[in-house]
Image (cartoon, rainbow, N blue to C red):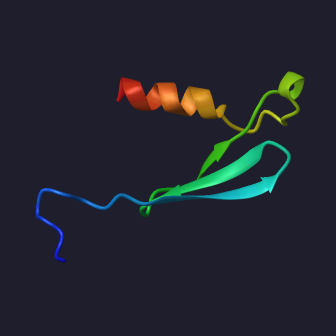
């Protein structure tokens, strides 16, 4: 069955780097890193998943 024109496929992928760190890939954009602060067992190398979600809602 062919997909209607008004439906679009959106893809994103993530690569777990260990601990709480994940690299996130969307289209051809630079990699985004998600992490947690040290008090949540992270290394603080990127925004938390919740911060990324909230920033998306602001866009």
Quarter of the image for residue 59 reads: top left
On the image, the x and y values in percent for residue 51 come to 58, 27
Quarter of the image for residue 5 reads: bottom left
| 6 on left or right of 16 | left
Say which quadrant the N terminus sits in.
bottom left
On the image, the x and y values in percent for residue 9 come to 31, 62
> What residue is at 18 percent from the left and 69 percent from the top?
3
Q: Residue furthest left?
A: 5
Q: For the image shown, how many numbered marks are present on the structure?
A: 0
- Up the image or down, 7 lies above or below 59; here it is below
On the image, the x and y values in percent for residue 32 come to 58, 48
| 43 on left or right of 1 | right
| 59 on left or right of 14 | left
> What residue is at 39 percent from the left and 26 percent from the top?
57
> What residue is at 43 percent from the left and 63 percent from the top?
28
- Up the image or down, 43 lies above or below 21; here it is above
């Amino acid at each position: 069955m062919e997909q209607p024109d008004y439906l679009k496929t959106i893809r994103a992928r993530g690569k777990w780097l260990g601990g709480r760190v994940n690299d996130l890939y969307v289209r051809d954009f630079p990699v985004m890193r998600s992490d947690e602060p040290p008090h949540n067992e992270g290394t603080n190398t990127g925004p938390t998943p919740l911060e990324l979600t909230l920033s998306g809602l602001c866009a």
